């Protein structure tokens, strides 16, 4: 691990200012991904601002009938919350489909949104990677791409966003609340939070330097049945090849977001409108502009079948 | 780089040490405090051999920085046996032969204790899911699960009114 200095922040605004002030500074919350990447020297912050004392660990009702989930609510606490289990089951299902108890106890809601790709070339410092080292090239393109993106990729990066929770947040139309270094706050719709790689694949999301996530809010419950179908090479210790977060209503309408297929949780609202016509209609629209590789073209029919499984589950519920 | 001054409670004892910010909790336990029961398997949070309790939460100590524990409470495998008496889980692991090389055992025991403190009557499925973050290369898990379930049964028996 490269040397760094460490401080604990007392308020969110102070934390944001501290990271913005010092070049190479980063926030430390659960650390389950950041510390791992620091050990590999893929992340080399010169200063860490520990935000774990900020008391952003409560889940509270919002005035419009939704929930405001503090940035530091652990994955375990979020998945176990009775209101989440009752009204936002897709969120609980997505969270418990990933990691282990030890990791979910430490990992936070905000940190989960910020986890970095598991593209094997990003993890291998001997390989060129535009995400790890801008301008160095992409070894994944033309390389082993079975796990990688089928849509929204660029000629500089075909990495995927690896998480599960954010896919559920996308289907729920969550909003990410932040505070910036100057103390101002903003609310970012989850659809606009993660980026497509384009010509800046080193940027995973649209946060500014020093901008700190304070909460994630979910709107009032959608009803329906909630599903999270995660397809992977083994039942545990693997990231999704394809995952589907879906909320299906009694009349067969619904919405779906896909994980493991793009640089961000993938949802096309115009495809949701086709839900009553079945899974194939939805994915034909959602993946209309797909650019799969020979190795990962299987992900598109897999997404159709995973969605078909959730629709069938919804009907039998 | 200036050293960090850490004051924390480990297995009920106040501890006080200096370390680099880069030191993991696991390395602080092993190298500064000489509590070498917690093991490093993968160093990346996958294997659970370094499992400890941090403020009553089961975590991988390899993915915690020592500076994070300043002012906090840590419990390790060394805190399981009390007054020279093995914890019931330790006794049952011996009875069932629920270990071979033993490298994963400290982490498994700390994780299993956390489970039984929460739920003294777990199903086999709950036990297997709870211990999914602790990898064992030797046992095939079956004896581990049986030892944990047997401990749970014994603890329930002890709690029955006389």
Image (cartoon, coloured by chain):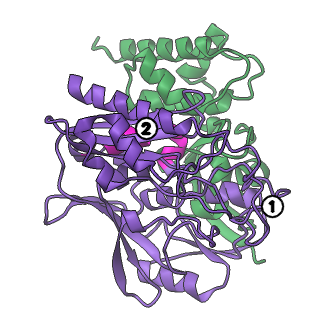
- How far, Cα to Cα, is label 2 from label 1? 34 Å
Q: Main secondary structure of the magenta part?
A: helix
Residue A274 or A308: which is nearer the viewer?
A274
Which quadrant is the C terminus of chain A positioned in?
top left
| Mark sitting earlier along the chain (2/1) | 2
Q: Quadrant of residue A11?
A: bottom left
Q: Is residue A31 found left or right of A246 in the rendered image?
A: right
**Identity of the residue drawn at 77% across and 64% down:** A137
Residue, disc 2: A96
> Seen in the image, is B56 located left or right of residue B84?
left
Residue B82 is inside the magenta segment: no
Looking at the image, residue B28 sits to the left or right of residue B113; the answer is right
Confirm or deny contact between disc 2 and disc 1 (CB under 8 A): no
Residue at (71% x, 61% y) in the render = A38
| As drawn, A235 above or below B44 | above
Q: Quadrant of the N terminus of chain A?
A: bottom right
For mark 1, give the secondary structure.
loop
- Give the class, few, some or many, for how many residues have Cα within 10 Å of label 1's Cα (few <14, many ≥20): some
Counting from the top left corner in percent of width and height, residue A177 is at 35, 71
Outermost residue, right direction?
A126
Chain drawn green in the picture: B
- The region drawn magenta spans A88-105
| Residue A317 visible here | no
B127, above or below B143, in the image: below
Which residue does the image show at 75% across and 67% down from the upper left? Answer: B20
Left or right: A146, with A207 as reference point? right
Chain bearing mark 1? A
Chain letter for purple, please.
A
Q: Which mark is residue A128?
A: 1
Q: Are marks 2 and 1 on the same chain?
A: yes
């Amino acid at each position: 691990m490269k040397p760094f200095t460490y401080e604990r922040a007392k308020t969110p605004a102070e934390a944001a200012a501290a990271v913005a002030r010092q070049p190479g500074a980063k926030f430390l919350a659960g650390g389950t991904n950041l510390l791992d990447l620091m050990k590999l020297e893929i992340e080399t912050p010169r200063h860490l601002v520990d935000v774990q004392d900020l008391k952003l660990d409560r889940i509270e009702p919002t005035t419009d009938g939704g929930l405001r989930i503090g940035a530091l609510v652990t994955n375990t606490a979020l998945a176990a919350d009775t209101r989440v289990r009752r009204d936002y089951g897709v969120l609980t299902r997505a969270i418990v489909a990933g990691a282990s108890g030890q990791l979910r106890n430490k990992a936070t809601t905000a940190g989960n949104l910020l986890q970095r790709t598991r593209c094997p070339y990003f993890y291998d410092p001997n390989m060129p990677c535009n995400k790890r080292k801008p301008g160095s090239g992409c070894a994944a393109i033309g390389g082993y791409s079975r796990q990688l993106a089928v849509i929204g990729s660029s000629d500089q990066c075909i990495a995927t966003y690896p998480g599960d929770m954010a896919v559920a947040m996308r289907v729920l139309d969550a909003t990410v609340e932040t505070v910036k270094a100057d103390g101002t706050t903003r609310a970012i719709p989850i659809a606009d939070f993660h980026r497509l790689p384009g010509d800046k694949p080193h940027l995973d999301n649209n946060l500014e330097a020093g901008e700190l996530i304070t909460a994630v809010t979910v709107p009032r419950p959608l009803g329906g049945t909630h599903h999270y179908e995660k397809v992977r090479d083994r039942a545990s210790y693997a990231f999704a090849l394809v995952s589907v977060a879906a909320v299906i209503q009694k009349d067969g309408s619904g919405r779906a977001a896909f994980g493991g297929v793009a640089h961000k949780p993938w949802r096309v609202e115009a495809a949701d409108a086709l839900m009553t016509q079945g899974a194939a209609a939805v994915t034909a629209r959602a993946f209309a502009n797909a650019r799969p590789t020979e190795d990962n073209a299987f992900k598109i029919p897999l997404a159709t079948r995973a969605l078909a499984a959730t629709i069938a589950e919804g009907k039998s519920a | 780089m200036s050293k960090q001054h850490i004051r924390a409670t480990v297995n009920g004892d106040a501890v006080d040490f200096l370390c680099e910010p880069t030191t993991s909790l696991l390395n602080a336990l092993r190298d500064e405090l000489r509590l070498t029961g917690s093991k490093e398997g993968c160093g990346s949070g996958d294997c659970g051999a370094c499992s400890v309790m941090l403020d009553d939460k089961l975590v991988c100590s390899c993915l915690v920085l020592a500076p994070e524990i300043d002012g906090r409470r840590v419990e390790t495998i060394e805190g399981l046996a009390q007054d020279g008496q093995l914890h019931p889980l330790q006794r049952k692991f011996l009875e069932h032969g629920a270990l071979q090389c033993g490298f994963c055992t400290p982490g498994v025991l700390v994780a299993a204790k956390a489970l039984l403190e929460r739920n003294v009557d777990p199903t086999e499925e709950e036990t297997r899911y709870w211990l999914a973050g602790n990898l064992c290369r030797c046992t095939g898990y079956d004896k581990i699960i049986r030892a944990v379930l047997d401990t749970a049964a014994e603890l329930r028996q002890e709690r029955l009114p006389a």
